[in-house]
Image (cartoon, rainbow, N blue to C red):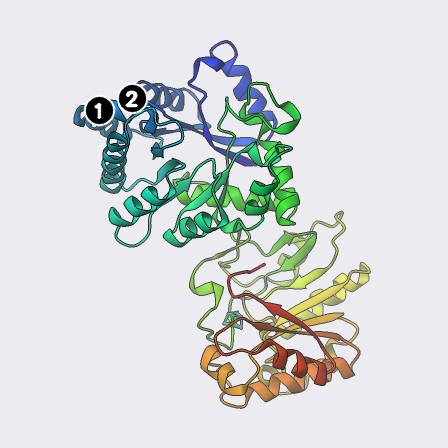
Amino acid sequence: MIIDTHCHLDFKDFDADRDQVIERAIKAGVSKIINVSSSLDGARRSVALAKAHEMIYAAVGVHPHDAETVTDGVIAELKALAKGKKVVAIGEVGLDYYRNLSPREAQVSAFRKFMHLARDLSLPLILHVREAEDDALKILREESSGGVRGVMHCFSGSADFMKECLDLGLYVSFTANITFKKADSLRLVAREAVPERLLLETDAPFLAPQALRGQRNEPAYLTHLVGEWSRLLDLSKEDIARITTHNANTLFALGLGEPSKIAYEIRGSLYLNITNRCTNTCSFCVRNQTSFVRGHNLRLDKEPSVDDIMKAIDPEKKYREFVFCGYGEPTLRLDMVKAVAARLKERGAKVRMVTNGHGDLINSRKIAGELAGLIDKVSVSLNTDTKDLYNRYCKPEFGADTYEGIKSFIKDCVAAGIEAEVTCLDLAGVDFKKCEAIAKSLGAGFRARSIGTVG
Ligand code: SF4
């Protein structure tokens, strides 16, 4: 399931075969389309399309090319339209100094009006900004207190501009222009994109992907973009589809149900989410900000039983490894870990556990020997190179000596024949060289992690 968050099915390019185009989109796995308006007439057509087709939603606005037409009367009409069902955004609006088809003053004035409209209606913005980055950022900052809810569509700017957009809270969306032969520099920027802030769009009828260059674009071709993102971000196509669908659902409030997951796949590994409890209260914990990791809802309604977990695993599918995940501390349910790992081992699977390393303290005994033969590898979040920093950032419930307890657990795992990996985070004050030396002294490998990257 993928979502085309920006196309123009109301354009006359689709008059001859609009229904077939929609059918082809559905067959290709496009579950929702947001039809984005360029004019008041286009907004009326978008709303009509959304009424006629369950899978289509509308955005209403006027393209900066036609900014001169944006009178108070037009804003009032758009406001009335936007109050209707299935209007999910104001767009596309913004600044285009590349073609300058409306005077810049008119563009700036219209842009400010649309920002007010979006704020009044609590709707996100779909932004078109071309060769006007500085003015756009200035207006976005001036007209918003704090962040801006919206997406920078058809992104073609620099990595610095993308960072400014992300800092403002915006999503970004590239079109199939990243598939073009001569788009190496844009692909370099795209590699810096944050999956959690990425949307998919075709901008059809424009910008057909490289393989269909010169033809009319249509939502079914969104699959080409999924393939390109998969290559650029080293995620599977399924990962890209799920993450961007979740993002679109979050930004545009499309009402898709996203039930919590016990088992979820990332890059061919199957993660097992068995508890949301933890014996740390880390200031940087992802659970403080979101229930979602890589588009999977990990906030459990209840802790699963062994049967629940085994039922959540596709028996036919081959996975690179099974991983007890770190959206909670697995060793709080040690018996469960052992029971599930034993069943997975019967399948000849590789099993890893992501842990905060408190297992001995939680279970009041040394547990490495119990894990031997069941767990092939532990990834232990030591996080810092000193006990003081650990206590400050992680606030462990076992008190000041927890750090030493974690090191002892790692050492025991290595002695029990379990491969161990220490992970540390780029928190202020943490010295990765020292972290690596600690890992080495325990007989473990080392991986530096960024607090901004989860999953
Ligand atoms: S150890 Fe992991 S799950 Fe527990 S609070 Fe820290 S970051 Fe969150």
The foreground one among 338 and 79 is 79
The foreground one among 98 and 153 is 98
Residue contact at pointers 1 and 2, CB within 8 angstroms: yes
Dividing the picture into quarters, in which one does residue 232 lie? Answer: top right
Nearer-N-terminus badge (1/2): 2
Q: CA distance from mark 1 to mark 2?
A: 7 Å
Q: Is residue 10 left or right of residue 28?
A: left
Which residue position holds label 1?
74
Mark seen at residue 40: 2
Identity of the residue drawn at 31% across and 18% down = 41
Q: Is residue 441 visible?
A: yes
Identity of the residue drawn at 64% across and 42% down = 237
Q: Is mark 2 within 8 Å of ligand 1?
A: no
Identity of the residue drawn at 43% across and 17% down = 11
* Looking at the image, residue 420 lies above or below residue 94: below
Residue 287 in percent (x, y) is at 47, 64
Crowding at label 1, few (<14), some or many (≥20) Cα neighbours within 10 Å? some
Q: Circle 2 sits in a helix, a strand or a loop, which is it?
A: helix
Q: Circle 1 sits in a helix, a strand or a loop, which is it?
A: helix
Quarter containing the C terminus: bottom right
Residue 324 in percent (x, y) is at 64, 65
Single out the residue that lies furthest toward the top.
16
Q: Is residue 416 left or right of residue 433?
A: right
